[in-house]
């Protein structure tokens, strides 16, 4: 029996490939036709993830070895390492590579098709697909995977999730432009990732400038305000201000894109509902402290693949509870893989971004950055922002986390 994976982002495409390698028949359905369309992600990834998660070399645009932070007063801080700390991927190329790998191992790939709905029954699921020119198809499969990202197209609509009153979602909206620079304009941003922090730059969020190959620059902002915040300045005018302040406003714009980053803080939402299992952003694997989710989406696929293979290999006369049993371990195993610091980073994200709207919060953030400039080197900063190792700075971070400072 077949598994249908809805969505060929990093999570869905990787999962489809892993399942097919294990001999499972897989249909991968993606609404986009061209992997380069709507390449919304800035795609910063720490260096370790390249090897750990087999990220294809061809998707790497540049490598970087420095952190550059602009504090709320515009003061610049830099941390440099001797070795590469990370890469900026070309997100479209990453998708292209992952799609190619899925095809090579025999995945049936329906691009330009949209998964519309799922009807789960005891033994199978009927999946309704809408294709080019409004074509309709229904596929009967054993399991369906919701890898549709933050929109949770199938899990969100198929049945009520577990109550997660004690949890809440953090929503971020980002926009990013790709600019064509030249030797001169790109020198200042080369080999490093630059972030702009403070309400003077972006209230409730942050801005960034990342280098790309061919003197291109990714300039973006992301905002994560508390729910129902009104009188928000349009993102486009905040981005234009950032371009003006950094004197990049004259460069030609090659592409404009954007998207939503959305995760629950405690990740208590249901991972399996009926015959639908969520993976990647659909089960809140985007980390909201730094708006980073590619490697966590890939990890979630790696954790789910063997469990789904086991579920598919149960004999057809096995009891329903035995068939679903391996999948019930997914939530716990993924929680374990993401580690105990994950929830802490979610709480820190909420506290940082929701509160970043006035001079008091700017002062707090400014003094934190200043403290880091004397106590941390570039590798420490990577451990802090990519591995969420806050405990090393316990006495400095705890009061910030608890709101005492
Ligand atoms: C502005 C911005 C900047 C970011 N920057 C970074 C960064 O620097 N580093 C990082 O690691 N992460 C970053 N992220 C987050 C990262 O891109 C995501 O966490 C990651 O892409 C999640 O992968 P996914 O496969 O779970 O979901 P997605 O990448 O969202 O993939 C979901 C796929 O499902 C498809 N789909 C949706 N609905 C349907 C449907 N009904 N039928 C068929 N297909 C469907 C979509 O077209 C899409 O291809 C950023 C996100 C945003 C918005």
Image (cartoon, helix red, strand yellow):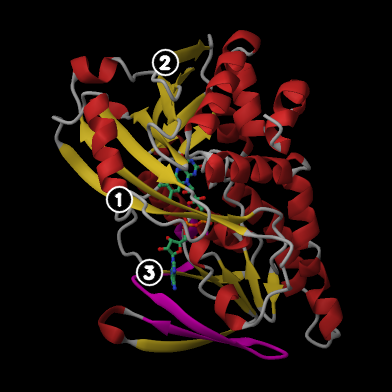
Residue depicted at x 22% and y 29%: 244
Local secondary structure at mark 3:
loop
Q: Quote the CA–CA distance across marks 3 and 2.
A: 44 Å
Question: How crowded is the residue under tag 3: few (<14 C-alpha within 10 Å), some, or many (20+)?
Answer: some
Q: Residue 315, position in %: x, y?
A: 80, 81
For the residues labelled 3 and 2, say whether their Cβ atoms are less than 8 Å apart. Answer: no
Q: Residue 205, position in %: x, y?
A: 46, 41
Q: Nearer the viewer, mark 3 or mark 2?
A: 2
Determine if the C-beta at disc 1 is less than 8 A from ligand 1.
Answer: no
* Residue 111 in the figure: left or right of residue 318: left
Q: Which residue is mark 1?
A: 234
Reply yes or no: does residue 367 show up in magenta.
no
Position above or below: 359 against 114:
above
Q: Residue 271, position in %: x, y?
A: 69, 67
Quarter of the picture holding the N terminus: bottom right
Q: Residue 384, position in %: x, y?
A: 65, 27
Quarter of the picture holding the C terminus: top right
Q: Which residue is mark 2?
A: 75
Reply yes or no: does residue 120 show up in magenta.
yes
For the residues labelled 1 and 3, say whether their Cβ atoms are less than 8 Å apart. Answer: no
Q: Which residue is mark 3?
A: 31
Q: Quote the CA–CA distance across marks 1 and 3.
A: 28 Å
Question: How crowded is the residue under tag 1: few (<14 C-alpha within 10 Å), some, or many (20+)?
Answer: few
Q: Quote the CA–CA distance across marks 1 and 2.
A: 25 Å
Segment tinted magenta in the rendering = 101-130
Q: Earlier in the sequence, mark 3 or mark 2?
A: 3
For the residues labelled 1 and 2, say whether their Cβ atoms are less than 8 Å apart. Answer: no
Residue depicted at x 65% and y 11%: 375
């Amino acid at each position: 029996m077949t598994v249908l994976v809805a969505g060929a982002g990093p999570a869905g495409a990787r999962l489809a490939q892993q399942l097919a390698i294990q001999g499972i028949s897989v249909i991968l359905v993606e609404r986009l036709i061209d992997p380069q369309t709507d390449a919304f992600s800035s795609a910063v990834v720490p260096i370790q993830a390249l090897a750990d998660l087999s990220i294809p070399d061809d998707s790497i645009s540049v490598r970087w070895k420095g952190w550059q932070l602009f504090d709320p007063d515009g003061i610049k801080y830099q941390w440099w390492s001797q070795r590469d700390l990370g890469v900026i991927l070309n997100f479209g190329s990453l998708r292209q590579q992952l799609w190619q790998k899925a095809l090579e191992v025999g995945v049936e790939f329906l691009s330009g098709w949209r998964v519309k709905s799922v009807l789960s029954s005891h033994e199978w699921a009927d999946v309704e697909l809408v294709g080019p020119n409004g074509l309709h198809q229904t596929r009967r499969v054993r399991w369906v995977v919701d890898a549709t990202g933050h929109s949770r197209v199938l899990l969100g609509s198929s049945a009520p999730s577990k109550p997660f009153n004690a949890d809440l979602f953090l929503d971020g909206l980002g926009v990013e432009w790709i600019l064509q620079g030249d030797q001169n304009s790109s020198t200042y941003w080369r080999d490093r990732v630059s972030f702009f922090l403070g309400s003077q730059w972006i209230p409730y969020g942050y801005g960034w400038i990342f280098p790309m190959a061919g003197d291109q620059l990714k300039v973006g902002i992301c905002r994560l305000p508390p729910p129902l915040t009104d009188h928000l300045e349009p993102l486009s005018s905040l981005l234009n201000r950032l371009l003006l302040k950094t004197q990049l406003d004259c460069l030609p714009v090659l592409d404009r894109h954007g998207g939503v980053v959305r995760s629950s803080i405690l990740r208590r939402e249901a991972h399996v509902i009926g015959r639908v299992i969520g993976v990647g952003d659909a089960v809140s694997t985007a980390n909201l402290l730094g708006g980073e989710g590619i490697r966590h989406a890939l990890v979630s696929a790696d954790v789910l693949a063997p469990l789904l293979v086991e579920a598919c290999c149960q004999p057809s006369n096995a009891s329903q509870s035995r068939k679903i049993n391996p999948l019930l371990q997914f939530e716990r195993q993924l929680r374990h893989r993401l580690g105990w610091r994950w929830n802490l980073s979610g709480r820190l994200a909420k506290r940082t971004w929701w509160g970043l709207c006035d001079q008091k919060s700017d002062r707090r953030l400014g003094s934190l950055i200043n403290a880091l400039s004397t106590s941390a080197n570039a590798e420490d900063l990577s451990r802090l922002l990519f591995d969420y190792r806050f405990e090393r700075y316990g006495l400095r971070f705890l009061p910030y986390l608890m709101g005492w400072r």
